[in-house]
Amino acid sequence: MKRLTSFVVLAAVLALAGCGGSSSAEEARTAGLTVTVPKGPPPKKLVVKDLEEGTGRPVKMGDQVTVRWAGYLYRRRREFFSTLKEHHPFTFLTGAGRVILGWDRGMVGMKAGGRRELIIPPSLAYENRGSTSVPPNETLIYVVELLAVE
């Protein structure tokens, strides 16, 4: 009986060790991507970080772009939606108000074939109204793959 109890305790300790961690950021994985959710308070301004440089001419306002993306909740540190897993592209016209403002601004300068991370504060996302899958006043992290620019 002591041996069984020791085994259960050891298993629990190992499971907990794998869940936590003392790293400076938490990570989520989507379709081969690793997204790092920074610790600390979310930024108040749009943060744009190229993860992989694309080729061709950069996106400008008024261009139609086709993307695949994954979205993460900053504070809850979890994915809320992804088109990367299903490989379903999404097409929109930049600057036309068809997406949140952080996406419109964050796409500018990106080149086809690139991968970019956008950290979008609530003021450039869903503000205090939220959406079906995003709580009010949530900062969002997107990883966007730019497939085409027209």
Image (spheres, helix red, strand yellow):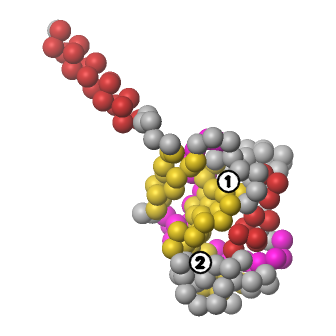
Query: Is residue 131 visible in this depiction of the protein?
Result: no
Of mark 2 and mark 1, the one earlier in the sequence is 1
Which residue is located at x 68 percent, y 79 percent?
Answer: 109
Is 17 drawn above or below residue 62 in the view shown?
Answer: above
Q: Which residues are magenta?
A: 75-97
Q: Which is the main secondary structure of the residues drawn in magenta?
A: loop
Q: Is 80 situated left or right of 4 in this image?
A: right
Is 78 drawn above or below residue 61 in the view shown?
Answer: above
User: CA–CA distance between discs 2 and 1?
Assistant: 18 Å
Q: Check if residue 76 falls in the magenta segment.
A: yes
Q: Mark 1: which amino acid?
A: Leu
Work out whether residue 110 or residue 76 is closer to the camera in this orientation and state it: 110
Give residue 15's quadrant in the image.
top left
Q: Is the residue marked by circle 1 packed among few (<14), some (14-19), or many (20+) residues within 10 Å?
A: many
Q: Quadrant of the C terminus?
A: bottom right
Is 14 drawn above or below residue 79 in the view shown?
Answer: above
Which residue is labeled 2 in the image? 146
Which residue is labeled 1 in the image? 140
Q: Is the residue marked by circle 2 packed among few (<14), some (14-19), or many (20+) residues within 10 Å?
A: many
Residue 105 pos. (x, y %): 76, 70
